[in-house]
Image: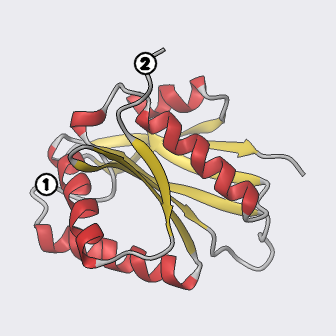
Amino acid sequence: MTPPIWSLRRLHAVDEGMIAELAGVLLDCVEGGASVSFMHPMPAGRAEAFWRHVAEGVASGKRALLVAEDASGVCGTVQLVLDQPENQPHRADLAKMLVHRRARRQGVGAALVRAAEAVARECGRTLLVLDTVTGGDAERMYEHMGWERVGVIPGYALMPRGGLVGTTVFYRRLGG
């Protein structure tokens, strides 16, 4: 098997250079039609503001942020939202799993999810939850990776260029 042409790492701080690279991935995903909470066209400043907010969460320990990098820079990312209500200290949300179009179908998404699961275990989490577009590539990936499908909420969100789409909710027990 050929080794990947990208690498993964967890960020414990996010500087302006990294914010720009992460914004580039987010902009590419929205441009490519991914339903990831933002509408098209998306201004670069909006993407950068989003990542600055995430950076605050990373700095305070409320979020864990992982990135995949290739020769061109950041090509994927995923977050764990660790800041949960006091009656849910065992849980985290897997959020904003984004892969740049140049790096798709190379195992980046699955590797990011596996790495996020490992970080969640390190943080003492035993349950992860997520939602993703119904019928999309990510839904198939999560099912293939053994995540448990809870169900579908029809008409949950708008696609970046309009039109309602359902979301599928998943969970994964990590032990404990």
Going 77% across and 69% down the picture, which residue do you hit? 88
Q: Position of residue 140 (x, y in %)?
A: 49, 25
Amino acid carrying label 2: it is: Thr
In the image: residue 41, left or right of residue 49? left
Q: Indicate the secondary structure of the residue bearing disc 1.
A: loop
Q: Secondary structure at mark 2?
A: loop
Q: Amino acid at mark 1?
A: His
Residue 29 is situated, as x and y percent measured from the top left of the image, at 24, 46
Name the residue at 21% across, 41% down: 33
User: Going 61% across and 37% down the picture, which residue do you hit?
Assistant: 151
**Front in this rendered view, residue 121 or 146:** 121
Report the label total. Answer: 2
> From this viewpoint, is residue 160 visible?
no
Name of the residue lying farthest toward the top: 1
- Residue 88 to residue 147: above or below: below
Crowdedness near tag 1: few (<14), some (14–19) or many (≥20) residues, C-alpha within 10 Å: some
Q: Which residue is mark 1?
A: 40
Left or right, residue 160 beside residue 154: left
Q: Where's residue 70, x and y in %? A: 30, 43
Q: Is residue 47 left or right of residue 37?
A: left
Please tell me whether residue 121 is drawn above or below residue 100 in the rendered image: below
155 and 161: which one is in front? Answer: 161
Vertical position of residue 53 compared to residue 65: above or below: below
For the rendered model, the colour scheme is secondary structure
Report the residue marked by disc 2. 2
Determine whether label 1 and label 2 are within 8 Å by CB.
no
Residue 103: image quadrant is top left
At x 58% / y 77%, what residue is drawn? 62
Measured as percent of width and height from the top left, residue 15 is found at 32, 77
Q: Quadrant of residue 93?
A: bottom right
Q: CA distance from mark 1 to mark 2?
A: 36 Å
Q: Which mark is residue 118?
A: none
